[in-house]
Image (cartoon, rainbow, N blue to C red):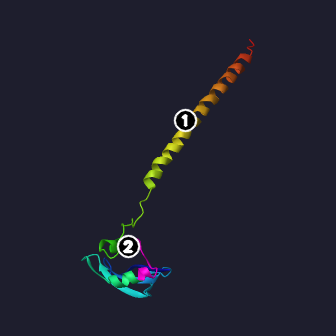
Amino acid sequence: MLSIRFLRQGKLHQPSYKIVVIEKTRPPKSGRFIEQLGFYNPLTKEKQLKADRINYWISKGAQPSDTMHNLLVRNKIIEGVKVAAHSIKKKKEEETEAPKTPAAKAPKQEESKQEEPKQEEPKQEEEKGEEVKIG
């Protein structure tokens, strides 16, 4: 399956990206792409896109990545709605749910602990009553 995505170029902390058509199974930094469709420099916001070639590859079945899709929509090369490129982590929701579950279990354990000493106390009283003083 073909994919239209970014191929990172540039120095450390100075990225620039080639926009390429590449086989989806290949690693992004392999450098073995089918065709270069433009470039994008996020630091200077400079970009060059070959709209006719991008539309050609999309018609052939190439799927743009989420970030690439958003760039193409922003530049009106394709029509559509922007896609959420990054998923939102749900750790906060899981953390709030986790304390509720042990808190619900904790009172049940406390109740059972309170019941056990009550049963033991009468046994101790009976033992005291059985003691006979010899005197």
- Which quarter of the image is occupied by the C terminus? top right
Which of the numbered marks, if any, corresponds to residue 107? 1
Which of the numbered marks, if any, corresponds to residue 123? none
> What residue sits 57% from the left and 34% below the top?
110
Q: In the image as oriented, which residue stretches furthest toward the top?
A: 135
Residue 43 percent location from the top left of the image:
26, 76
The quarter of the picture where residue 132 lies is: top right
- Mark 1 vs mark 2: which is more N-terminal? 2
Q: Label 2, on which residue?
A: 69
| Callout in the foreground (1, 2) | 2
Give above or below for 29 relative to 133. Answer: below
Q: Nearer the viewer, residue 11 or 128?
A: 11
Q: Which residues are magenta?
A: 57-67
> What residue sits 49% from the left and 45% below the top?
99
Q: Any magenta on residue 60?
A: yes
Residue 130 percent location from the top left of the image:
74, 17
> Mark 2: which amino acid?
His
Q: Any magenta on residue 69?
A: no
Q: Nearer the viewer, residue 109 or 4?
A: 4
Give above or below for 52 relative to 135. Answer: below
**Is 127 positioned to the left or the right of 5 in the image?**
right
Residue 114 percent location from the top left of the image:
59, 30
The quarter of the picture where residue 40 lies is: bottom left
> Mark 1: which amino acid?
Pro
